[in-house]
Amino acid sequence: MKVCGRSEVIEQPKEIKQGDEEQGPRPRGAFFMAPAQASYTPTLHRDEINSRALVIDTETTGRGATAEIIEVAVCTLDGELIFESLVRPMSSVPRAAARIHGLTTESLTSAPIWDEVWRRLEPMVSARTLIAYNAPFDARMLDVMCAGYRLPRPVVRWRCAMRFVKEHFGLRRAPTLTEACQRFGIEPGTHRAASDARATAALLQRILKSSPKG
């Protein structure tokens, strides 16, 4: 797997008190948490599956209020990977999370911190339509990470592929990405950001081809 932007720079501890106006990377142990609740994320409309849209996926240390992004990838709807990076977290990766995606605390020690990752990623996604499978979760995680590093909130147009699949097939329960891929004979992702992003893109393209717009 290609890992973009690895860095050997380790931030030195520095105390930041509440109310400080200092900008830039947060120090270890001083994480400004953003609200745990995600704002409403509209479902994806088939007309939005176009060249202006990008697909994003993240891997995290968990799903709770203290979770952090540890991998992020972005691809086009044709499946072309345009960004991929590991992210060094401030806290340890729980074993339960590591069993899912295989990323451990030790494997991330040389990865860049979120401040470095986002400064390269933000110009690529700013003002674009960002599609994610279970977009409310990915949107909340990006908000949390940017808030934690005192970076501006992402200015993107989020759309949810999972809700699109659920509504397209009239399902009572939203299928997982693996379940949705299996329905169309698409190889599912491997719980890594790049493979899951590409699987989502392939799924959307297959749905469009199987049900042409009338």
Image (cartoon, grey):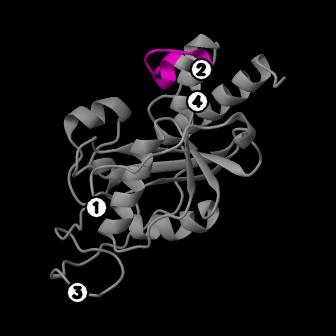
Q: Nearer the viewer, residue 5 or 167?
A: 167
Q: Amino acid at mark 3?
A: Asp
Instruction: Tell me the CA gap for discs 1 and 3.
Output: 16 Å
Q: Nearer the viewer, residue 119 or 98?
A: 119
Q: Nearer the viewer, mark 1 or mark 2?
A: 1
Instruction: State the CA–CA distance, disc 4 to disc 2.
Output: 19 Å
Q: Considering only order in the chain, which callout, 3 or 1, is on the residue closer to the N terminus?
A: 3
- Residue 187's disc is 2
Between label 3 and label 2, give the one nearer the viewer: 3
Marks 1,2: beta carbons within 8 A: no
Is tag 3's residue or tag 4's residue first in the polypeptide sequence?
A: 3
Task: Tell which tag, 3 or 4, sits nearer the viewer.
Answer: 4
Secondary structure at badge 2 equals: loop
Q: Amino acid at mark 2?
A: Glu
Residue carrying label 4 = 164
Specify whether residue 177 is painted magenta.
yes
Q: Residue reaching furthest right?
A: 214
Inspect the image, locate mark 1, and give the three-letter code of the amino acid beneath it: Ala
Magenta residues, start to end: 168-179
Q: Could you say which disc has been placed on residue 20 in the image?
A: 3
> Which mark sits nearer the N-terminus, 3 or 2?
3
Residue 24 sits in quarter: bottom left
Residue at mark 1:
34
Number of residue marks:
4
Instruction: Name the side, left or right, on which 138 lies relative to 95.
Output: right
Give the camera-side residue of 154 and 41.
41
Indicate which disc, 4 or 1, sits on the residue closer to the N terminus: 1
The secondary structure type at the circle numbered 4 is helix
Q: Position of residue 25 (x, y in %)?
A: 34, 75
* C-alpha distance separating marks 3 and 4: 42 Å
In the rendered image, is residue 110 in sight? no
